[in-house]
Image (tube, coloured by chain):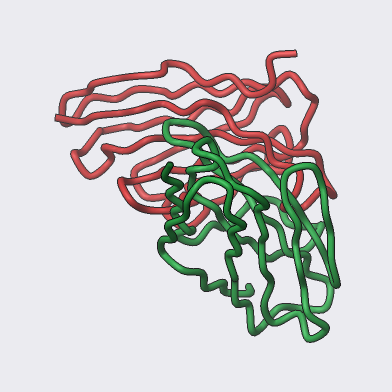
Amino acid sequence: NAGVTQTPKFQVLKTGQSMTLQCAQDMNHEYMSWYRQDPGMGLRLIHYSVGAGITDQGEVPNGYNVSRSTTEDFPLRLLSAAPSQTSVYFCASSLAGTGDRGAFFGQGTRLTVV
Amino acid sequence: LAKTTQPISMDSYEGQEVNITCSHNNIATNDYITWYQQFPSQGPRFIIQGYKTKVTNEVASLFIPADRKSSTLSLPRVSLSDTAVYYCLVGSTTRTALIFGKGTTLSVSS
């Protein structure tokens, strides 16, 4: 059982480049979400999804797009990377009804935009 | 959404008991209190959840007074490996995504 898998683990982008951070879970969880964590800060919610075909914005959605075509995958797209998007990105999944106790996190993607 | 307040940092020595208090004055009736632990370069992981009174598991204890406006995470006899950031969250079972504060950075020294 792999849990939540994020790829890549590290990435360096130039300003203006685009890329997709991948997130996959094999636990058949309905809910998936993306967070960013800046140095010395807590995690901030970017986007989340309550099921295939349904997504919504979190606290800091600007500059990011998501889609959820399958239960397993929830990619995060940066259309035009900016240095302000340098951060560590975490993906999480959980079963509906488990609330705050049920989230499983991936190992993170460390993104640097130069 | 119930806002939480916890100390930014705490220091301890190996073998000591550590208590981290979280304030959540506007907690709702159907909200639970949940704590996550995050080691450096890793994603957070769930450690304990409670609704009222006391909950204990193999990792920690959680104390919640009757008014539920605060809670205390207790880590017995900490070791160096307990050095981490601890987050207090308040939300119901219908929550679809977690909302984190800045957390408490616990540093354990020998």
Residue plotted at (44% across, 24% down): A21
User: From the viewer's perspective, is residue B88 above or below residue A107?
Assistant: below
Q: Is residue A78 left or right of residue A107?
A: left
In the image shown, does B50 or A61 lie closer to the viewer?
Answer: B50
Quadrant for residue B22, please give it.
Answer: bottom right
Residue A87, x across and y down, in percent: 32, 38
Q: Position of residue B9 (x, y in %)?
A: 41, 61
Q: Quadrant of the N terminus of chain A?
A: top right
In percent of width and height, residue B70 lies at: 67, 77
Quadrant position of the C terminus of chain A in the picture: top left
Q: Which hue belongs to chain B?
A: green
Please name whichever residue, A32 or B69, is drawn nearer the observer in this view of the structure. Answer: B69
Q: Looking at the rendering, which quadrant does residue A67 occupy?
A: top right
Q: Is residue B109 above or below residue A15?
A: below
Q: Is residue A18 left or right of residue B64?
A: left
Residue occupying the point 69% across, 72% down:
B71
**Residue A28 or residue B33, whichever sits in front:** B33
User: In the displayed structure, does residue A72 sit left or right of residue A16?
Assistant: right
At a point 16% along the width and 24% down the height, the residue shown is A14
**Hue used for the chain lettered A:** red
Q: Kindly identify the residue that appears in the image at 72 percent across and 52 percent down.
A: A100
Left or right, B55 with reference to A45: right
